[in-house]
Image (cartoon, rainbow, N blue to C red):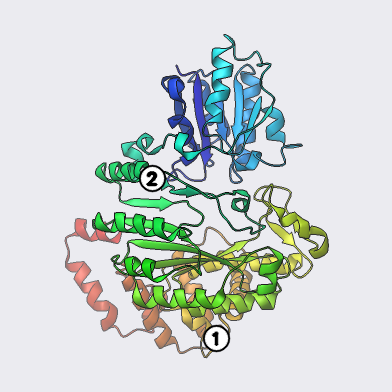
């Protein structure tokens, strides 16, 4: 049985815990005495407790994040009641700041704040090697242990500890750098100074091994992948020269930094292989100044134009609702401006008050009120009252279902036809939709389609045959073979009866398989 269990509760099974693999890779001589045990937040806490106790560990290290702190607290509470002698060590961003008063911190034996790649192994050595019974607290350890910023030249890379099942079925995370030179006050990355680069020879060798093991999807977690242009170019060229069909690379990019030498490489990637996550957050320069965010909007627009018209990059752009100083009108103007730039996805996020971030300095002036519970989303502020914030929260959810799902690519612009504001028209649709169904989750796609059709043809009074024809285009593009019943009376029968007759001619077994 292992002495050390490294564990966390992932948001979903598909996510592979990057941090645990770093900790495991750097355990040195303790590695044979350790295992990784991953769970997800949808499992019952007592089932997780049972699985952990079955391994009979002496030490359990938990990765604690904003999305799992509630469930992890419940797990640790049960562990401490059943087996109080097990040493509990916490780490992760949720327990690296403002530790005083946190229930989960009170339950734990030790908390390592900051990057614990090397410090976790050091603590375990003191607990396991210096004391035959690790339940006897080491006099050399305080409860809150601050990890020194580790030098990447001393860190063992974790990539060989992704299993074959991880590579085949889960999202695999990689990083070529850590830290961020910017000071955006809502983001923990603004505290990570300086930016540190992974030694490229070791990193590229690890990427080569992942490719040889069959990995085709690489998700980079670097906050500013294109900060160092020379390194970015080298990495992109590395992947481009080794590209095979089905490969996919995700990078988080600085939106106003895309010089010619990067453009030349990016333009060579085939369709479907590159995704750029572009954090814009606000188009309001006054708001940007308040939150210490600097960006050149003209250069950003030029970069978007290049990416949309001269490359096959999929752009995922972010905006945030609830920033100090952001009015409804200024957010609406920013949303409309982003729609005009044409990214394939717009992630509308709600401001969160992450522990340790300096956004709290605006609390008094802008009357910022946040939820007391994870994920600490803003409830209201001086400019957006609670009722309006609830409407905007629904706007963000419905936009994800309609605007980002890929199911309504052709139909979507009908919502803001005739030059109307995309934000205000979708906001109107959002309020209308909520008045019909009074929920934002568990909405069947067929029901959502029918409601959108009703909105466009009755509320917007658009011509039903034109809307139906466009809906059918979206259905066919996403692979749907059967015409939804609510469309049939508005479509020429030949547009769907041919498909119906063709399906009837197929053997029943094959037809059923395709319908699924």
User: What quarter of the picture does the C terminus occupy?
Assistant: bottom left
Label 1, on which residue?
Answer: 460
**Quick check: can you spot residue 428?**
no
User: Is 154 above or below relative to 93?
Assistant: above
Residue 54 point in image, percent of width and height: 49, 20
Q: Which residue is mark 2?
A: 170
The CA span between labels 1 and 2 is 42 Å
Above or below residue 161? Residue 346 is: below
Q: Which of the image's four quarters has the N terminus?
A: top left
Residue at the spot x=22%, y=68% of the render?
A: 503
| Residue extending farthest right | 364
Q: Dot 1 lies on which element? A: loop
- x and y percent of residue 110 in the render? 65, 27
Q: Quadrant of the rendered structure where residue 112 is? A: top right
Residue 367: x and y, percent? 81, 62
Q: Is residue 445 visible?
A: yes
Q: Nearer the viewer, residue 289 or 440?
A: 289
Disc 1 or 2, which lies upstream in sequence?
A: 2
At 53% from the left edge and 50% from the top edge, which residue is drawn?
195
Q: Quadrant of residue 32?
A: top left
Residue 51 appears at what percent x and percent y? Answer: 49, 26
Q: Is residue 73 above or below residue 497?
A: above
Residue at 43%, 49% in the rendered image = 176
Which quarter of the figure has residue 325? bottom right
Answer few, some or many: residues within 10 Å of disc 2's Cα (few below 14, many 20 plus, some between 14 and 19).
some
SS under mark 2: loop
Indicate left or right for 451 with 294 as reference.
left
């Amino acid at each position: 049985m292992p002495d050390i269990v490294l564990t966390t509760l992932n948001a979903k099974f598909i996510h592979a815990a990057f941090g645990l693999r770093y900790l495991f890779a750097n355990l040195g001589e303790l590695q044979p005495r350790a295992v990784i045990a991953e769970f997800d937040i949808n499992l019952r806490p007592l089932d997780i407790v049972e699985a952990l106790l079955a391994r009979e560990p002496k030490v359990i290290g938990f990765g604690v994040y904003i999305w799992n702190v509630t469930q992890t607290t419940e797990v640790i509470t049960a562990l401490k009641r059943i087996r109080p002698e097990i040493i509990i060590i916490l780490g992760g961003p949720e327990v690296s700041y403002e530790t005083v008063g946190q229930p989960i911190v009170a339950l734990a034996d030790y908390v390592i704040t900051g990057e614990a790649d090397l410090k976790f192994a050091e603590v375990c050595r003191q607990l396991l090697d210096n004391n035959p019974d690790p339940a006897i607290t080491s006099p050399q350890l305080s409860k809150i242990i601050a990890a020194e910023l580790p030098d990447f030249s001393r860190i063992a890379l974790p990539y060989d500890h992704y299993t074959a099942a991880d590579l085949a079925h889960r999202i695999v995370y990689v990083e070529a750098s850590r830290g961020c030179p910017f000071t955006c006050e809502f983001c923990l990355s603004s505290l990570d100074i300086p930016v540190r680069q992974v030694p490229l020879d070791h990193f590229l060798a690890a990427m080569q091994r992942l490719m040889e093991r069959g990995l085709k999807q690489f998700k980079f977690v670097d906050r500013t992948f294109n900060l160092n242009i020379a390194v970015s170019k080298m990495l992109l060229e590395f992947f481009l020269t080794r590209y095979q069909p089905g490969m996919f690379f995700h990078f988080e990019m600085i939106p106003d930094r895309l010089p010619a030498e990067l453009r030349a490489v990016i333009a060579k990637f085939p369709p479907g292989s590159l995704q750029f996550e572009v954090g814009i957050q606000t188009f309001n320069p006054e708001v940007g100044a308040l939150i210490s965010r600097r960006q050149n909007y003209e250069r950003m627009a030029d970069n978007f134009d290049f990416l949309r018209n001269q490359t096959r990059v999929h752009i995922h752009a972010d905006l945030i609702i609830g920033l100090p100083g952001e009015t409804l009108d200024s957010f609406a103007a920013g949303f409309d401006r982003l729609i005009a730039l044409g990214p394939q996805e717009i992630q509308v996020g709600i401001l969160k008050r992450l522990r340790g971030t300096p956004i709290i300095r605006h609390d008094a002036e802008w009357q910022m009120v946040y939820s007391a519970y994870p994920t600490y989303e803003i409830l209201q502020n001086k400019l957006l009252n609670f009722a309006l914030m609830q409407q905007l929260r629904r706007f963000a959810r419905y936009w994800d279902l309609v605007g980002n799902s890929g199911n309504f690519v052709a139909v979507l612009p009908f919502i803001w036809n005739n030059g109307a504001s995309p934000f205000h028209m979708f906001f109107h649709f959002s309020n209308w939709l909520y008045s019909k169904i009074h929920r934002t989750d568990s909405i069947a796609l067929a029901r959502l389609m029918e409601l959108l059709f009703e909105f466009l043809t009755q509320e917007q009074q658009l011509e039903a045959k034109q809307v139906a024809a466009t809906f059918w285009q979206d259905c066919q593009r996403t692979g749907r073979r059967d015409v939804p019943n609510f469309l049939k009376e508005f479509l020429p029968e030949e547009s769907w009866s041919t498909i119906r007759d063709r399906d009837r001619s197929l053997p029943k077994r094959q037809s059923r398989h395709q319908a699924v």
